[in-house]
Amino acid sequence: MSWIFFRQALANWRATGAIAPSSAKLAHQMIRAAGVETAQCILELGPGTGPFTSQISSAMPAGARYLGLEMNPAFVATLRARFPSLRFETAPAQEFDYAEFLGPEGSFDVIVSGLPWTAFPETLQVAILDQVMPLLRKGGVLVTFAYSGFHLLPNGRRFRSLLRERCSRLETSNTVWPNLPPAFVYSAVK
Ligand SMILES: C[S@@+](CC[C@H](N)C(=O)[O-])C[C@H]1O[C@@H](n2cnc3c(N)ncnc32)[C@H](O)[C@@H]1O
């Protein structure tokens, strides 16, 4: 998985925004913060090669619905082969027709984001947050991660304040050191 990821990162640096897939330790922290084990409807943004997906698929209740949106077709091919029972779409998160998956009244219980927010300009941060936050049920949680230190860069600080404006509570985890680079988890409760 690391080799596919590294090749795609070289070819699509801006969209990939990382040099290696997230570690199992970071994935564990993300999935625990999300409370996937009680979720009935789960959205994953930017699953890449699937380090979070792997733990989501083990933890999610039988019968829960899952949608993974990944804009890199090479990653989507890998994900479909690895997780044949989950639904993946090759689509940018800011453009997907969510009503087609949720129906007119539906909502997500949990959103797990692996998107490289700090690499995104403000317009894209806003476009994605404004697409998905209204689809999160009240009390639902969006979890995402930031590389320690990078969150202090202007794009990282802006992302944090955009997220804070769109949720009722924003929590941060301790640093997960066994990750390249070390990272922490944001849990944004709506
Ligand atoms: C930092 S990588 C994280 C991959 C994986 N979640 C992990 O933690 O190893 C970011 C992923 O988001 C995807 N991505 C970037 N922009 C996207 C967008 N607008 N919509 C959907 N996926 C996107 C990239 O193709 C890449 O797979």
Image (tube, rainbow, N blue to C red):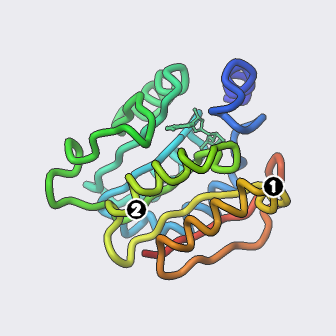
Q: Amino acid at mark 2?
A: Met
Residue receiving disc 2: 133
6 is higher (above) or lower (below) than 117: above
Residue receiving disc 1: 150
- Rendered image: mark on residue 130: none
Residue drawn at (37%, 69%), measured in percent from left and top? Answer: 38
38 is higher (above) or lower (below) than 64: below
Residue reaching furthest front? 123
Sequence-earlier tag: 2 or 1: 2
147 is higher (above) or lower (below) than 67: below
Residue reaching furthest bottom? 169
Please tell me in which quadrant of the rendered image residue 64 appears: bottom left
Q: Amino acid at mark 1?
A: Phe
Q: Disc 2 and disc 1: Cα gap in Å?
A: 23 Å
Q: Secondary structure at mark 2?
A: helix
Residue 144 locus on image (x, y percent): 59, 58
Residue reaching furthest left? 104
Left or right: 71 with respect to 150?
Answer: left
Label 1 environment density (alpha carbons within 10 Å; few <14, some 14–19, many ≥20): some
140 is higher (above) or lower (below) than 48: below
Left or right: 185 with respect to 32?
Answer: right
**Which residue occupies the foreground of this view, 39 or 167?**
167
Q: Quadrant of the N terminus?
A: top right
Residue 61 locus on image (x, y percent): 34, 60
